[in-house]
Amino acid sequence: MDARDFLTIADHFRASLREAERRTSIGRSYYALFNVVLGTLAAKGAAFHQSADDHRDLVAYLTKVGHRDTGPIGQALNDLRAHRNTADYKMSDPISVKTTEFVYEKAKRAIERFDAIPSAEINEIARKIQAIP
């Protein structure tokens, strides 16, 4: 499965009149970015635990490897995770269309930025992640 398909679902629900669908959009936006980045780096040799720790670890790795694009992508992932946690766990916090569209666009831009990194640089990023204790 291509995790980018989650972004299609997020797009479909991002302007919904139903709050549950807007919350779904936020979750799918986050998971699109998370799975695109994690899946690509794992395929290039970066080891992950396939556990809840991977969410935190991926952000840390992206900010530590020193590539010009991974820091901002890591920050976007961290920001999206906070929005996803609100959407999934804080039912008393309303989720507006404006917020949902912001999250969707942030995920889309971060995926586009990640996809623009040349393959050789992705390989180097994965190698650096492997070297982080």
Image: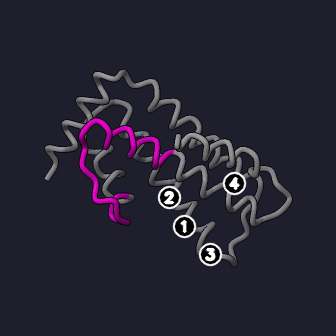
Q: Residues within 10 Å of mark 4 (few under 14, many from 20)?
A: some
Three-letter code, disc 3? Lys
Residue at image coords 60%, 69%: 88
Q: Which mark is residue 81?
A: 2
Query: Mark 1 = which residue?
Result: 85
Asked if disc 4 and disc 2 are in contact, CB closer than 8 Å, the reply is: no
Q: Amino acid at mark 4?
A: Thr
Q: Position of residue 125 (x, y in %)?
A: 26, 34
Task: Find residue 69 and report its horizontal and vertical position in percent.
Answer: 38, 32
Secondary structure under the numbered disc 3 in the rendered image = loop
Marks 1/3 in contact by CB < 8 Å: the verdict is yes
Furthest residue toward front: 1
User: Disc 3 designates what residue?
Assistant: 90
Q: Nearer the viewer, residue 70 or 6?
A: 6
- Residue located 39% across and 58% down the image: 55
Among the two numbered marks 1 and 3 on one chain, the one whose residue lies closer to the N terminus = 1
Q: Are marks 1 and 4 in contact (CB under 8 Å)?
A: no
Amino acid carrying label 1: it is Asn
| Residue interval drawn in magenta | 33-54
Work out whether mark 3 precedes mark 4 in sequence or the reverse, and give the earlier one: 3
| SS category of the residue bearing label 4 | helix
Q: Is there CB contact under 8 Å for labels 2 and 3?
A: no
| Left or right: 128 as drawn, with respect to 80 | left
Q: Is residue 110 left or right of residue 94?
A: left
